[in-house]
Amino acid sequence: MQHATENAPEEPYEKGMHIIYDVLTRCAIINFRGKMDIVGPFPGRGAAVAAAEALCRKKGWGKR
């Protein structure tokens, strides 16, 4: 699996976890544990994906 960020996160994405960058709105669309969030806009894809991954970490991604 290829990760969305240039520096791959330490934890792999969970099954069903998706981050999509919308180039028109410059927002990240996040599907995490059955819930969808939209964050942004951001200056670019890297910033959007980093913010999306941070939100997922805040919601428990990577915690066992």
Image (cartoon, grey):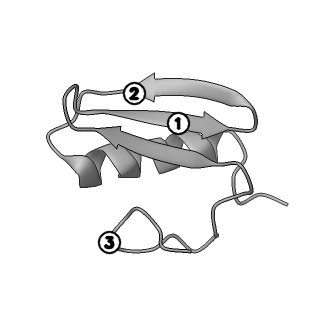
Give amino acid for label 1. Answer: Ile
Q: Residues within 10 Å of mark 1 (few under 14, many from 20)?
A: many
Q: Is mark 1 on a helix, strand or loop?
A: strand
Give amino acid for label 3. Answer: Glu
Give amino acid for label 2. Answer: Val
Q: Which residue is drawn at 21% across and 37% down?
A: 23
Please give the count of numbered marks on the rendered protein: 3
Q: Is mark 2 on a helix, strand or loop?
A: strand
Hey, which quadrant is residue 4 in on the image?
Answer: bottom left
Q: How far apart are marks 3 and 1 (CA)?
A: 18 Å
Disc 2 marks which residue?
Answer: 39
Residue 58 shown left or right of residue 23 in the figure: right
Q: Residue at x 53, y 39 (%)?
A: 55
Q: Distance between the residues labelled 3 and 2?
A: 19 Å
The percent position of residue 57, horizontal first and vertical second, equals 61, 49
Disc 1 marks which residue?
Answer: 30
Disc 3 marks which residue?
Answer: 6
The quarter of the picture where the N terminus appears is bottom right
Which residue occupies the extreme left position in the image? 43
Sequence-wise, the earlier of marks 1 and 2 is 1
